Amino acid sequence: MYLHAGCQIAVSPDTKSFAVDWLGVEVSRATLGIIGMGSIGYKVAQRARAFNMRILYHNRNRRRKEEEEAVGAHYCAQMKDLLQQSDFVMLVVNLTPETHKLIGKKELELMKPTATLINISRGGVIDQEALVEALQNKVIRAAALDVTYPEPLPRDHPLLKLNNVIITPHIGTATVQAIHAMAEEAINNILAVLNGQPIPSEVFPK
């Protein structure tokens, strides 16, 4: 939030001085709650540990003890416990019938009023109407969304009018290196199929 607004202040032709009391919040020593501790969620935890964050996670299946200890993560069997304790809540789950609108009015009200909700999974994991209401009424401090539904949002959508939300156009993997890696992985899968070998990244039907 502060980076985006700060950039606008820095380049605005109306700016005469910078406010000394314009303050953000630190991630160091803050509590990060990760909902969905698959491969991506675990990599988030690895990076968060470098910032000395306290890491909580909620997942269908608990990680092995050695994996938890490697990143200093603590398992929350109940998602509500994670929501109540976290300064930052990050959604890293697949969109399924079970996770559709996983975060709604009830879940948002469990969060700290100083908390930030981050969604890097799919837009449908959040009830957007409930999120708009929560942001308008300061139920939570802010939201950072790389995904929405639909994408892009209609230009008159209320999320676009709020100053305590930042939205990016689904660019979580949008780097030259990531696109090259995905292309190589796809090629390796194709070659494996053609050669009758095990598929490295096989997707199994549910």
Image: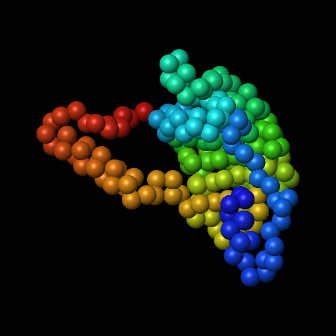
In the shown orientation, is residue 1 left or right of residue 201? right
Above/below status of 78 relative to 45: above
Q: Residue 196 occupies which quadrant of the picture?
A: top left
* Residue at the (53%, 17%) spot, across then down: 65
| The N terminus: image quadrant | bottom right
Residue 193: percent from left, percent from top: 19, 41
* Residue at the (25%, 36%) spot, across then down: 199
Above/below status of 155 relative to 159: below
Residue 79: percent from left, percent from top: 68, 29
Q: Residue furthest bottom?
A: 13
Residue 29 seen anywhere in this rendered image of the structure: yes
Q: Of 72 and 138, which appears nearest the observer?
A: 72
| The C terminus: image quadrant | top left
* Residue at the (55%, 21%) spot, across then down: 69
In the shown orientation, is residue 45 left or right of residue 110? left
Q: Of 39 and 195, which appears nearest the observer?
A: 39
Above/below status of 177 relative to 125: below
